[in-house]
Image (cartoon, grey):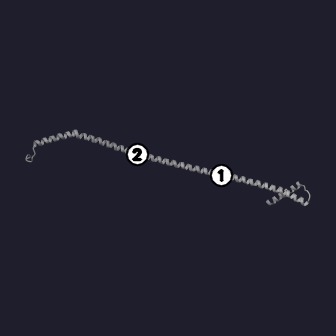
Amino acid sequence: MLETLGIHFPSLIIYLVNFVLLLGLLYLFAYKPILRIMDERADRIRDSLAAADQARAEAASSHEAIEEQLNEARREGQRLLDQAREAARRFRDEEMDRARQEAETFVSRARSDIQRERDAAIEEVRANFGDLAITAAERVLRRTLDRQAHQDLIAQVLEEGESLSRG
């Protein structure tokens, strides 16, 4: 009955033996090397992925380190800027104090100069007034008076006048 279908049993066995032999040879000479090559390739891909992950981690840590350095540089810059501002403020305050002291010294010196000039003017007025009074008295009396006695009298009168005006 198989022969009516066109299947010849001895040929079928030969084909089957050939197929099994071919499958065995392919398994030994093709399948195992292909599997080994595929395993090696999978290992290389795994290693490459691990290296990529490690590079990514290093890049991330490097990025964090760079960010930290940038932040540190910013803090350092801010600190230097604050120091410069503080130094400028101190310098400005010192210069203002120095200018204030110079102004106070100038005012004090001016006051003492004014007082000295005032005292000198008063003395000059006293001296001139005394001479003028003596001259006027001489003309009125048409005779020479004792100049020293009149000077003493005028000084006494001026002192009494100052004490009255103060009191």
Label 2 amino acid?
Ala
Few, some or many residues within 10 Å of mark 2 (<14, 14–19, 20+):
few
Residue 164 location (% of width, % of height)? 81, 60
**Element marked by disc 2:** helix
Few, some or many residues within 10 Å of mark 1 (<14, 14–19, 20+):
few
The number of numbered discs placed on residues in the rendered structure image is 2
- In the picture, the disc for residue 149 is none
Considering depth in this image, is 90 or 144 the residue closer to the camera?
144
Residue 85 location (% of width, % of height)? 56, 50
Q: Which residue is mark 1?
A: 99
**Element marked by disc 1:** helix
Q: Is residue 167 visible?
A: no
Residue at the image point whose x is 27% and y is 40% from the top? 37
Q: Is residue 95 visible?
A: yes
Measured Cα–Cα span from mark 2 to mark 1 = 58 Å
Q: Report whether 140 appears left or right of 114.
A: right
Considering depth in this image, is 94 or 50 the residue closer to the camera?
94
Residue at the image point whose x is 29% and y is 42% from the top? 41
Taking 9 as reference, is 167 above or below it? Answer: below
Residue 75 location (% of width, % of height)? 50, 48
Q: Which residue is mark 2?
A: 59
